[in-house]
Amino acid sequence: MDSARPHKRPTALDRMLTPIHRWIWSDTDRRVQKLLRFSETETDGGRDILRAAEVTSDPLLRRLYLEHAIDEFRHGILFRRRAAALLKVSPSRSNPGFQGAWLAPGGHGLDDLQIYGESDSDMLAFLHLSEKAAASRFTVYRDVMEHDPPTRAVFEEILHDETFHMGYTLTQLARVEPQRHKRHLWRARLSRLWKAYLRLASGLAGVLGSLLLTIQYFVLLPPFAWLAKRAARQEGSGWITVSPGRTDSLSRQY
Ligand SMILES: [Fe+2]
Ligand SMILES: [Fe+2]
């Protein structure tokens, strides 16, 4: 698609998280894993937009969705190729460790896209906000990639398309729903906010769960281990003689 549009400035939150993004992307293994995950997100998003092209009754939207879907498939291929090139240079460890998926998600949030039952205006509002988020994050990811020019170039190239997607979805929303397009945008914004909260909450729950289990392991288990060792020390070793009177009953062992 046309790529001559200016890039969007990242949001304040994305700018604030720049040092964390820099750290996340600094590790080659983590970079490979993230690029592969981004590739999946883009390809899945492309598939969903292709489906949106099938269900819309608006001929112009159908054509734009088709071109949009082709772009997203291409982004998936670009990310995958770059991950493969990095893998050739440095084979990945089996466990790359912390991924920061909820801190540095795959841009779009297109995985939340629901095709069925959505009106054209709802779809366009959702797509516009998703593309806006992608443009903001990819700008930051590109900027923190000074140490890896080829990956930086991939983000740069994809960023042009995402900026175009962001623009056309807003223009089309204003065409389809000239009076109420802002209302649709706010509804989509609230829905994204709720999903972002759920993502953050599940990420935090994972961290807190690991922390609590670690504390339990070091605080609760040692007393039990000490009691078990003390009980073992009090037990006599070897055969124990049972007094004659205790073997008469057939209803108990001793
Ligand atoms: Fe994309
Ligand atoms: Fe896009």
Image (tube, rainbow, N blue to C red):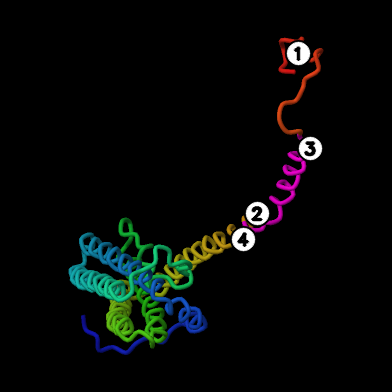
Residue type indicated by callout 4: Leu
Characterize the local packing of mark 1: few (<14), some (14-19) or many (20 or more) Cα atoms within 10 angstroms.
few
Please say whether residue 17 is visible from this viewpoint: yes
Q: Is residue 39 above or below residue 141?
A: above
Q: Earlier in the sequence, mark 3 or mark 1?
A: 3
Q: Earlier in the sequence, mark 2 or mark 1?
A: 2
- In contact (CB < 8 Å): disc 3 and disc 4: no
Q: Quadrant of residue 116 in the image?
A: bottom left
Q: What residue did someone put label 1 on?
A: 247
Magenta part, dominant SS: helix
Residue type indicated by callout 1: Thr
Is residue 103 found left or right of 166 in the rendered image? Answer: right
Residue type indicated by callout 3: Gln
- In contact (CB < 8 Å): disc 3 and disc 2: no
Cα–Cα span, label 4 and label 1? 51 Å
Residue type indicated by callout 2: Tyr
Mark number displayed over residue 234:
3
Cα–Cα span, label 3 and label 2? 25 Å
Of tags 2 and 4, the one toward the viewer is 2
Mark number displayed over residue 63:
none
Instruction: Write down the region rendered in magenta.
Output: 214-235
Cα–Cα span, label 3 and label 1? 23 Å
Of tags 2 and 1, the one toward the viewer is 1
Residue 10 x, y percent position in the rendering: 43, 84
Q: What residue did someone put label 2 on?
A: 217
Q: Earlier in the sequence, mark 2 or mark 4?
A: 4
Q: What residue did someone put label 4 on?
A: 211
